[in-house]
Image (cartoon, coloured by chain):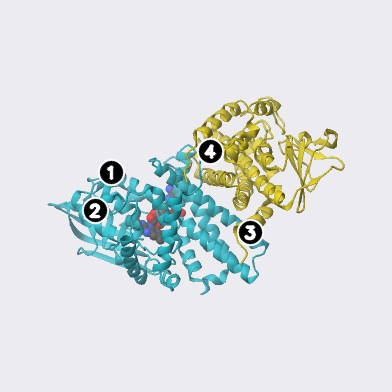
Chain colours: A yellow, B cyan
Amino acid sequence: MDFTLTADQSALCDAIDRLAQRFDAKPIDFHGFALASAELDRELEEGSYFDIAQIPELGPLSAAMAVERLARCAHASETALSMLVRPQLPGEFARALALVENGRPGRFVAQARTLILIDGEELAIAEPAPEQLEAVHSIYAYPMGRVKGELKRNRLSAADAASIRSWLRVALAAEASGLIQAAIDSTVEHISVRKQFGRPLGSFQALRHRMAECQVLAGGLRWLMLKAAWSGDAGDAALAASHAQDSGTRIVYDLHQMLGAMGMTLEHPLHLWTYRLKALFSELGGRGGQASAVAQHCFAAA
Amino acid sequence: MDFAWTPEQQRFRAELRAFLAEHLPPNWEELADGPASELQSQFANGFCGKLAAAGLLVPHWPARWGGRDADPWTAFILAEEMWMAGEPRGGQYMNVNWIGPTLMRFGSPEQQQRYIPPMAQGHTIWCQGFSEPEAGSDLASLRTRAEPDGDHYRISGQKIWTSYAGYADTCFLLARTSPGKNGISIFLVPMDTPGITVRQIPSVIGEGDIHEVFFDAVCVPATAMLGGEGQAWDIVRAALSLERVGIPRFALASRALQRAVKRLQQLGRFGNGAIEQAARAQAACEAARLYSYAIIDQRAHGIIAGPEASAARYATVNAERAVGEFVVEHLPEALAGGDALLQAHHQRAIVAGIASGAAEIQLNLIATELLKLPREPR
Ligand SMILES: Cc1cc2nc3c(=O)[nH]c(=O)nc-3n(C[C@H](O)[C@H](O)[C@H](O)COP(=O)(O)OP(=O)(O)OC[C@H]3O[C@@H](n4cnc5c(N)ncnc54)[C@H](O)[C@@H]3O)c2cc1C
């Protein structure tokens, strides 16, 4: 047990942070939902950052740190599945990756060159042609898309499917962790400045405590997510995803409440993180799905 | 960053488990009901003596005081295994965690010689005389007075909620020597000093846990003061930084949850509602565990934990609450003669958000020091 970053991890985190900083802020004139950056995507490709998990000195743990940091950017990028799930797929697959659950629209589906399809208990992979995909307008703050027509599916073996489900959970938790922290930071900033009744809102204990509780949940999620990325254990992954959806649901509500009407605007960036989080809450079966996975992997059958 | 235990740490944990398996009596779980009861206090004395003889009581203390200079991880693994087993050390865990180390750092040579060896041998119980009827969270408002009288002090006042006082040999006492926060001093007071009266307070936590302690012109020599006059605040702050993540409550919470789930599975009652709640509780336990490990990791690197320790504490409160609520809702019979361990856990879990700094005080610290939110006006 030693939580200090290795020299390689520090160097990676610094590099990712420098890159991410350029995409942290929402452009002033952007008043929409799906803010994504092709430039960020390209720079990540050029820096070979999508292959972090395969580098022995770095591995999935470092990839999870990168996903978490990039998820804090106002500009979304398809990093989580590419960095954490793609290395676990049986074979070489092109990015971007996207998840399609039971035919529903999903994040980055219209851009995807590889789809992971979940239909009930079955997991399959498809490599769609662009004309088989279409963008859908959505308030989820990711570029959302869906599949048109039939795809050629490559069904995964039970063992591969179990492993991919687990890494999907880690990816979800890493993404959620970054989104939640960015949303908290932005709300802290707002209530530190905004004054009512002659005082900054953040000096009222009702909000201080609520915010502190959000931070405790966010910090717990970050540790669970890092541990899961480190261990690759199905139980750890289920716990991290469960905590992500459970605490995320509560935090999203609380943060919007603390921002008042300002949080309703598309001018303030909060919705970019919170509405992305909302897209994550139903994934992989939602809280019930994570709970079944926890039951399966963390509570041995009597 | 590495989440793996070293082989040495794994061996140490295995050694502790073997020791517990050998030395806890078969009826231990029933005995453990009432962590400060007469039975358990007596048991703890014998048990701590055996731990000491095996070199397992204070491994993280310096060799000079009977330890082997082991690192903070060793100390925490020890704490985890003991708490998970129902804390067979009773109140002596406080000696091991913070009273001994505080005396090593701030005690006079005479105080160290007198008090540390019996702690290292596992034969002495201390109590912590901080809280008063009018001074709970606002500890600095305490009113117990210590007035100089030649080369002695006369102490008068009342302490409350004092754990383990019924069988304690010595009290780590806070008393006022002058007004204000910097007017509080620490006295090491033998509990058989004339003028001390202890009264047990019946509680939901179990037999013998909390007490009132009255000090009626109790006369102690000036040499009973720990550190200098008015130094209590600084010393206590250092001592309690060890205590904030002192008890690995998540370890017993997690064990209790596992046991409750197993029982429900056997009874065919682990359905969807229970599964969702159990998953949430398990995640809360693991979050608290990792949070706490992060603090121990800082300690191991010589960093004094800041507000993250309060976050770790609060995560632990969440875990205790989640497990407690799970058992009450899904396995209610556990608290009606069904399972002594689950009942003992439940009785202790309720304390998590109150003792050693209430949960809301931790939230205040997190808001101000971690999130840097503006302070509340005073
Ligand atoms: C089992 C147990 C064992 C204990 N053992 C010992 C012991 O051995 N020695 C000892 O000295 N003490 C001991 N204590 C006392 C413990 O330290 C106090 O209970 C604790 O400091 C809280 O004080 P209080 O109980 O007076 O609560 P109060 O201070 O009255 O607080 C009541 C509630 O109000 C909240 N509150 C208080 N101030 C604020 C604020 N500024 N903002 C928001 N909320 C606030 C608290 O968080 C809490 O929820 C023990 C307590 C328990 C339960």
* Residue placed under numbered mark 1 in the picture: B182
Could you say whether the residue bearing mark 2 is in a helix, strand or loop? Answer: strand
Name the mark on residue A295. Answer: 3
What whole-number distance in Å separates the C-alpha atoms at marks 3 and 1?
A: 52 Å
What whole-number distance in Å separates the C-alpha atoms at marks 2 and 3?
A: 51 Å
Chain for numbered disc 3: A
Relative image position of residue B53 (x, y in whole percent): 31, 62
Q: In the rendered structure, which disc, 2 or 1, sits on the residue that comes first in sequence?
A: 1
- In the image: residue B57, left or right of residue A164: left
> Which amino acid, mark 4?
Leu
Residue at coordinates 63% horizontally, 62% vertically from top-left? B274
Name the mark on residue B96. Answer: none
* Residue placed under numbered mark 4 in the picture: A201
Ligand 1 is located in which of the four quadrants? Answer: bottom left
* Residue placed under numbered mark 2 in the picture: B187
Q: In the rendered structure, which disc, 4 or 3, sits on the residue that comes first in sequence?
A: 4
Relative image position of residue B275 (x, y in whole percent): 64, 60
Indicate which label's residue lies in the foreground, 3 or 1.
Answer: 3
User: Which residue is the extreme one toward the right?
Assistant: A149
Relative height, residue A76 to residue B168 (above, below): above
Relative image position of residue B134 (x, y in whole percent): 35, 55
Indicate which label's residue lies in the foreground, 4 or 3.
Answer: 3
> Which amino acid, mark 1?
Asn
Indicate which label's residue lies in the foreground, 2 or 3.
Answer: 3
Residue at coordinates 34% horizontally, 68% vertically from top-left? B41
Could you say whether the residue bearing mark 4 is in a helix, strand or loop? Answer: helix
What whole-number distance in Å separates the C-alpha atoms at marks 1 and 4?
A: 32 Å
Labels 1 and 4 within one chain: no
